[in-house]
Amino acid sequence: MNTTLLLVGILVLAVGTFSLRLAGPWMRTRFELPERAQQVMAVAAVVLLAALVATAALTDGHGGAGIARPAGVLVGGVLAWRKAPFVLVVVAAAATAAGLRLLGVP
């Protein structure tokens, strides 16, 4: 691969990322979003996070993830919803998935 092209690409992406990070606070003082748009953006963030969790929990490559991983995510989700400590959430989710796999559940 052309090293110069790679460095130019990295530089362009770095400048773009930095510009976007500066534009947020700068644009916030310039105009205000309508209340409805703010509500839609809040809901969209939750929907995107739920889609990410569902995709990571239910798929493995091009196929399904089996039962153990979704069961672990479910246990972790319930504990997080019940406001358990983060370490407990992670350990319980991992232990659930590992225990089911140890028992032969895919």
Image: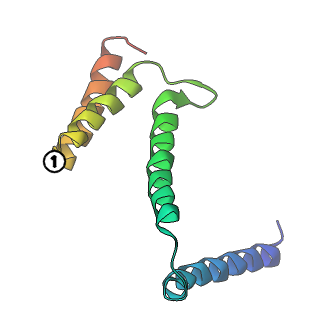
Q: Residue at x 27, y 21 (%)?
A: 99
Q: List the single residue furthest toward the front.
A: 35
**Could you tell me residue 63's position as x and y percent?**
60, 23
Residue at numbered disc 1: 85
Q: List the single residue furthest toward the top.
A: 104
Identify the image quadrant of the N terminus: bottom right
**Could you tell me residue 54's position as x and y percent?**
47, 35
Q: Nearer the viewer, residue 99 or 89?
A: 89
| Dot 1: element | loop
Q: Residues within 10 Å of mark 1 (few under 14, many from 20)?
A: few
Left or right relative to 19: residue 46: left
Identify the image quadrant of the C terminus: top left
Say which quarter of the image contains residue 97: top left
**Could you tell me residue 85's position as x and y percent?**
16, 47
Say how the picture is coloured: rainbow
Q: Residue at x 25, y 34 (%)?
A: 78
For residue 64, above or below residue 51: above
Left or right relative to 47: residue 88: left
Left or right relative to 48: residue 17: right
Amino acid type assigned to the residue bearing label 1 in the image: Pro
Left or right relative to 62: residue 64: left
For residue 27, above or below residue 74: below
